[in-house]
Image: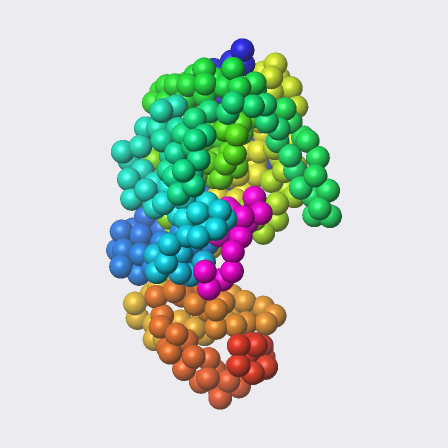
Amino acid sequence: MRDFNYFNLSNLTWDTEILSLVAGIYQEVGKQHFFINAHQAKLSTLTVTAMTDSTIASNEIEGIVTTKPRLTQLMEKQAGPKTRSEKEIVGYRDVLSMILDSYEAIQISKNHILQLHKILYGRLNDPMGGRTKDVQNYIVATRVDGYREIIFTPLSPLETPEALDRACKEYVLAIGKRVVDPLILIPTFIHDFLCIHPFNDGNGRMSRLLTTLLLCQNGFLVGKYISLEEKIARDKEPYYEALSQCSEGWHEGKEQPLPFIKYLLGTILAAYKDLDERASLMDGTLSALETVRMAVRTKIGRISKADILEVCPWLSLSSVEGSLRKLVEMGELRREGTGKATYYVRLD
């Protein structure tokens, strides 16, 4: 049986890239601590946007999609899910909402993870929701050209319940003893979770939900305001490559965890950089025009109203439209297209 002794991590030597990523994340946390406490009202709009982006992106990674109008209705609870895909999307929304609201009360244990999985599949009335797998499964990567390949064979169904239980207990013990920085331990645990692959379905989505949960529990709240899942979805190839590199030798406890740790830390740091960008736009002294002007300067190429609302969700649509119109009149932007196809181009 695979050993999950996370105390061994304290014996490893971390290269300068990992140390730099960890230091960068803590620097961002320090910069934004007081800002987060002082701007809860505006940040609540970022939370809504991040939850929507995370739900859409994490499901899209697994090929679970629906139309944009239906997504809006589902996320805003204007309608109930009808298709299997919509039920899975709403299940993810339900779990993520619970995590963001109650992360301090959720234990890292086999039983709590099973309960989260049950909620994930609760809309489907799936008998395997909340139960570990009953058939052998495989980690399969879909490349950019559509080719699918098996990159890892996880534990067998018989080994899975005990392995999941042990991994959780060892994580809780290691995080309590602070044997290694949480930013090192969290990616290691998530990688082990993926290698166990405890469920017939939903392992990838559960791993991303658990990542947000563990980060929030350890004071890294960026996942509340910026979607980590969306960053993964934008370029899945490095994600699968890191998993593949780390999985070699995993069953024998001889894997090299660095690639996935670096990948996840890079994703977290990029999310914090995005949050810092959003924070600079939330200055209460800025008018809507100045806020939109600053938002425009963060973009290149075609810029739409949706792009501005994405980084400034606390602004109303009419404020964004009015500000863009003024920037066009002032010669800072050029408007192209008509109707829904309208976009803007910077002239500087």
Residue at figure coordinates x 41%, y 48% from the top left: 90
Over which residues does the magenta segment extend? 56-70
Q: Is residue 319 above or below residue 183?
A: below
* Residue 127 position by quadrant: top left
Q: Position of residue 100 (x, y in %)?
A: 33, 44
Q: Residue at x 51, y 60 (%)?
A: 67
Residue plotted at (35% across, 72% down): 316
Q: Of 339 and 133, which appears nearest the observer?
A: 133
In the picture shown, does residue 143 fall above or below 328?
above
Residue 275 quadrant: bottom left
Q: Please state the horizontal and vertical placement of residue 28, each as a whole percent of the image.
A: 42, 47
Q: Position of residue 188 (x, y in %)?
A: 51, 27
Q: Nearer the viewer, residue 27 or 253?
A: 253
Judged by its main secondary structure, the magenta piece is helix
- Work out whether residue 226 can be spotted: no
Please, which residue is most extreme toward the bottom here?
A: 329
Q: Is residue 191 left or right of residue 288?
A: right
